[in-house]
Amino acid sequence: MIPEDHPRYAALVVRERLADAMRAGIVAPEGLIAQGRGEAFDYLLGERTTASAARAETDAAAMLLAARRPVISVNGNTAALSAHQLADLQEASGALVEVNLFHRTEERMHKITALLEEHGVDVLSGVPERLIPLSHDRALCLPDGIGAADLVLVPLEDGDRCAALRQMGKAVIAVDLNPLSRTAQTATLPVIDEVRRAVPAIAAACRTMTPAAARERACGVDGKRYLKEAIAAIAARLEEMGHALE
Ligand code: PTJ
């Protein structure tokens, strides 16, 4: 039981949700460590969507709407945190949703798919093939899904898949609180924000953009700028907190 007057109440509720999802076999045990890393960066960013991240979220909406075959790739943590929000993003963006796991087991694939479907997400099914040039199971994807996508939205992941997807000629939008992660650094567009803030913001932006405006905005996306702005926001906040102690 988490006391509501605890100063970290909201964060503790999220932790409890992820721990429950881990016990239910949705989140990998390693996913709890990933959440801790995310929390640390969120702390440094002030646990808010920066003005820069809000612009990146509008860019993400433009890229999704302008894409020919956009796919949202969902792992255990994203499903546990944002299943309810993904149905809305899918509806607003018209993107396909595919489950792709690092710690892949058939049991987790089924459980995550069932959780997403319970929340109204239409999850792509089919026979996976090893189409992404990687030695681990994130290489497995659906030929009609990530395999055929021109754009993949990758929330909450660090590793080598983003670079492999880029090598395949696909655009990648990453949602990652860590601007230094390999995924954020190699994405076409890094959205440096918490996934539960980013997903509804991207969905809302999709709903206000015309197809022509989306195509125009998608052409001018500058991912590196968002990395620089996030690092600058962290540096400014650290400096400010240091000064406050003087
Ligand atoms: O479900 P699986 O088997 O596919 O496994 C998923 C995990 C999350 C275990 C796997 O992808 C992993 O190990 O991820 P990493 O390498 O720990 O990277 C996760 C990244 O997401 C880190 O850069 C974190 O900063 C970031 N992150 C963590 N929580 C959040 C987040 N970004 C946005 N919102 C969050 N809530």
Image (cartoon, rainbow, N blue to C red):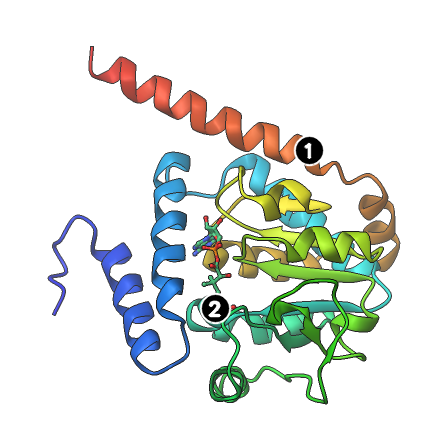
Q: Is residue 47 visible?
A: no
> Looking at the image, do the residues carrying marks 2 and 1 touch, with CB atoms under 8 Å apart?
no
Question: In front here: 186 or 79?
Answer: 186
Q: Position of residue 51 (x, y in %)?
A: 55, 36
Question: In front here: 165 or 236?
Answer: 165
User: Regarding mark 1 in the picture, which secondary structure is present there?
Assistant: helix
The residue lying at 34 percent from left, 19 percent from top is: 240
Question: 148 left or right of 155?
Answer: right
Number of numbered markers: 2
Q: Earlier in the sequence, mark 2 or mark 1?
A: 2
For label 1, count other residues whose C-alpha is less than 10 Å away and answer few (under 14), some (14-19) or many (20+): some
Q: Is residue 198 visible?
A: yes
Q: Residue furthest front?
A: 135
State the CA–CA distance, disc 2 to disc 1. Answer: 26 Å
Q: Which mark is residue 224?
A: 1
Q: Position of residue 6 (x, y in %)?
A: 13, 53
Q: Which mark is residue 82?
A: 2
In the figure, 37 relative to 222: above or below? below
Q: Position of residue 223 (x, y in %)?
A: 70, 38
Quadrant in which the N terminus is drawn: bottom left
Tell me which amino acid carries mark 1: Lys
Q: Which mark is residue 197?
A: none
Q: Position of residue 44 (x, y in %)?
A: 37, 35
Q: Quadrant of residue 126?
A: bottom right
The residue lying at 65 percent from left, 58 percent from top is: 161
For label 2, count other residues whose C-alpha is less than 10 Å away and answer few (under 14), some (14-19) or many (20+): some
Tell me which amino acid carries mark 2: Ser
In the figure, 125 relative to 45: above or below? below
The residue lying at 81 percent from left, 47 percent from top is: 218
Question: 235 left or right of 93?
Answer: left
The residue lying at 20 percent from left, 56 percent from top is: 9
In the figure, 211 relative to 143: above or below? above
